[in-house]
Each structure stands twice: as C-alpha cells, then as structure tokens.
C-alpha cells in the first residue's frame, strides 16, 4: 500500500536545468572554454561541487580548492538571479493536478532534492504548502545514488521505504530510490531510466492508478 510519494525537484517538478546551464556556461566561457547543452546533461541530479569538478574535466582545467569554492559561489549567484524571477507558471505540466490527486487520496508528499536552493524554488513556485516533508541539499551528506535523501524523507513521513514511490528524472536518482528499497517512477525516456519500475514522459494524464506494482 503506497503511503508516500517523494519527488525530485529539477527535471520532475520544474525545469531548472536550463538556468543551471546558463550559469555554468558563463562560468566555463569565463575560464576560456565552451560548455554545451549536451555537457549540461552530465550535471543533472549532481551536487554543485561535483558539477564544478565535471565542468573542470570538460575544460581540461585544474583549480585549487579555494578557487573552486569561489567559482561555485559565483555560479550560484548568477543562477539565483534566474531562480528569483521564476513564477508558478514554470511548474511542469500536470504536476499540480497530480499533487491534488495525492492529497485527495491521503498519500503524503515529500521532496528529495540535491539542490541547496530547493526552498527558494518551491517558494517561487508557490508549492511549499503541498509538501509534508522537505529534504534537500542542505540536509544530506551523501549524494545520489546514495539513498540518504529519500530515506530521510520516508522517515519524516513515518513511511516504510517499501510503501514509498520516488519520482526521478536522473539515472543516479533512480538508483538512489532502488538502493533505498523504494519503487521508482522515471520521468523522461525509458532508454536512460531503464532501472526505474515504470517510466512516463511527464505527469500529464498520469495517475497512481496506472502503477501496477
Ligand atoms: P544547487 P535535483 C539538482 O537538483 C540539479 O539537478 C543539479 O543540476 C544541481 O547541480 C543540484 O541540484 C544542486 O543544485 O546548486 O542549487 O545546490 O534534480 O536533485 O532536484
Ligand atoms: Mg532531477
């Protein structure tokens, strides 16, 4: 019996990847190399500091730790400029109806995101009140595919992992859910999310009744 649904943020509830991309690209350009949308795919679901490491690898640059922290902060400042302009219209199609449906069914809702800006984003989207529990990048020490972020969410909701469904768009996130003993619905393409129990392109027309696990 499913008692809780845990949602990733970027790529599931909202497309913040496009803003991450602009900010990482301008950082890369400042360092003298290009950063493509394809490169950006590698940063989805990955923490801020790990993202910078991947970016350095792409550009073939080596930076000391102090510089890395400074650049990550600079990237976040630019990213925040975009985030603070977001409106509820940017909630991905079908998400709000799905939340309403879960509420009506008495199923709890939690957030399980790697982002340290998750609270700001939920506020901008006016979604905070839908969540019974929020676990984000400020609460965890181990990144996905470690299940920490989802297990914390389940614990806050007093739900057994076996009774939780995770919604994820990134491969590492799907793995995190499975590693935590939860079922996972992949949001995106079945080719990439082949470890998920069920894959849908998005929430439009989707309901819990479709899950046959
Ligand atoms: P921040 P999610 C992730 O969000 C993003 O997918 C990833 O691209 C980003 O680097 C990470 O959050 C950290 O974000 O810099 O805001 O702390 O998909 O886990 O909701
Ligand atoms: Mg994501």
Image (tube, rainbow, N blue to C red):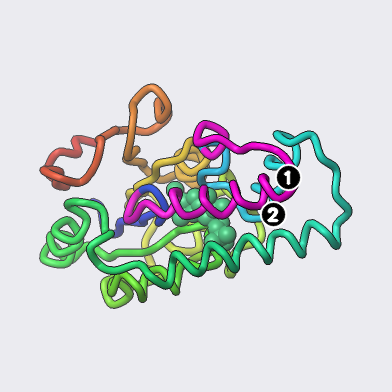
Name the residue nearer the viewer: 190 or 26: 26
**Over which residues does the magenta segment extend?**
12-40
How many labels sit on residues? 2
Say which element carries label 1: helix
Q: Where is 89 relative to 17, above or below?
A: below
In the rendered image, residue 57, in percent from the top left (x then y), is placed at 75, 36
- Which residue has dot 1 on it? 53
Q: Is mark 1 within 8 Å of ligand 1?
A: no
Name which residue lies at 17% across and 67% down: 103
Quadrant where the C terminus sits is top left
Give how far apart the Cα atoms at labels 1 and 2 are: 6 Å
- Which residue has dot 2 on it? 49
Say which element carries label 2: helix
Please check the rendered image and state whether residue 181 is part of the magenta-colored stretch, yes or no.
no
Q: Residue furthest right?
A: 64
In the rendered image, residue 83, in percent from the top left (x then y), is placed at 44, 66
Please check the rendered image and state whether residue 37 is part of the magenta-colored stretch, yes or no.
yes
């Amino acid at each position: 019996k499913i008692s809780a649904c845990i949602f990733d943020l970027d790529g599931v509830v909202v497309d913040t990847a496009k803003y991450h991309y602009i900010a990482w690209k301008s950082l890369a350009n400042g360092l003298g190399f290009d950063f493509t949308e394809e490169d950006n795919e590698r940063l989805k679901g990955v923490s801020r500091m790990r993202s910078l490491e991947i970016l350095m690898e792409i550009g073939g640059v080596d930076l000391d730790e102090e510089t890395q922290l400074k650049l990550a902060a600079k990237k976040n400042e630019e990213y925040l400029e975009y985030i603070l302009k977001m409106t509820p219209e940017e909630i991905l199609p079908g998400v709000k109806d799905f939340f309403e449906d879960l509420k009506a069914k008495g199923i709890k809702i939690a957030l399980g995101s790697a982002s340290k800006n998750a609270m700001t984003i939920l506020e901008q989207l006016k979604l905070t009140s839908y969540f019974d529990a929020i676990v984000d990048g400020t609460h965890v020490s181990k990144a996905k595919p470690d299940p920490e972020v989802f297990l914390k969410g389940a614990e806050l909701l007093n739900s057994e992992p076996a009774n939780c469904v995770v919604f994820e768009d990134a491969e590492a996130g799907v793995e995190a859910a499975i590693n935590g003993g939860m079922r996972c619905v992949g949001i995106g393409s079945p080719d990439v999310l082949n470890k998920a129990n069920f894959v849908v392109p998005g929430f439009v027309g989707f309901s819990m009744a479709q899950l046959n696990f």
